[in-house]
Amino acid sequence: MIEDDLELAEVLTEFLEDLKMEIITEDDPFNALSRLKLEEFDLVILDLTLPGMDGLEVCAEIRAKQNVPIIISSARSDINDKIKALELGADDYLPKPYDPRELEARINSVLRRYDNVEVKQNEEKTDFTLNEDSMEIQYKSTLLDLTNAEYGILAFMIKKQGFVISREDLIHNVTAINEESSNKSIDVMVGRIRNKIGEKGLIESIRGIGYKLLR
């Protein structure tokens, strides 16, 4: 939850924790963005009026790098703010004040939509076979000869197939990659994976961000 009204944040946190949800609150948008790079969250509740950085900018920054669901929680009633937030990739817009039970309903609704998308993607045909127990990946029934880091990168891409993955996502989610690794070293490893797959166009480079596994 990115919210600078700490009293409201405390009320919402207490309510949601009673529903067995784990809530982390940040009142500083810069700290929140840094935390989102380092940790994995199921959903973001985002206020728009924040110190030092407008919530719309925060929304755009999150969406450019991650596919985490975003619910806007704001007292700003301007329809233009709502339209802009949704255009930037927010999944829902909840105007303050509201009953916490409505927030609960919105959270459950958004998470169901995301779960359905992930299930649909997992059911789509893919030429990759991932075996996490043996740490092996096959492409069109051919076993790929991968290093631990290359396996980690490709396995993460397979799980996030169709979504844009930043280099930071790879650094923080692939244990075989050193956290001090540079963007260039990540690019080199992805290049080696492409060569081992032997088919062009499967891993798309997204300029300024990272990559996307297309199929």
Image: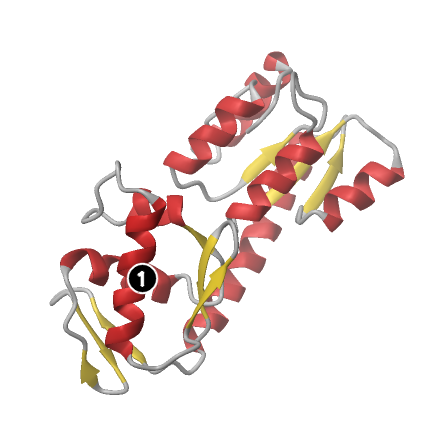
Q: In this image, 212 relative to 130: left or right?
A: right
Q: Quadrant of the N terminus?
A: top right
Amino acid type of the residue that numbered disc 1 sits on in the rendered structure: Val
**Image spot of residue 50 (x, y percent):** 67, 20
183 up-or-down from 188: above or below: above
**Which sits in the foreground, 54 or 210?**
210
73 up-or-down from 124: above or below: above
- Report the residue marked by disc 1: 190
Q: In this image, 210 relative to 181: left or right?
A: right
**Image spot of residue 13 (x, y percent):** 52, 24
Q: Residue furthest left?
A: 134
Q: Quadrant of the C terminus?
A: bottom left
**Image spot of residue 92 (x, y percent):** 69, 46
**Which sits in the foreground, 166 or 46?**
166
- Visible in this render: residue 3? yes
Other-residue count near label 1 (Cα within 10 Å), few / some / many at <14 / 14–19 / ≥20 = some
106 up-or-down from 163: above or below: above
Seen at 42% across and 83% down, the residue is: 125
The residue tagged with tag 1: helix, strand or loop?
Answer: helix
Q: In this image, 79 relative to 200: left or right?
A: right
Seen at 22% across and 47% down, the residue is: 177
* Visual colour scheme: secondary structure
**Image spot of residue 69 (x, y percent):** 56, 47
Q: Residue furthest right?
A: 79
**Which sits in the foreground, 81 or 140?**
140
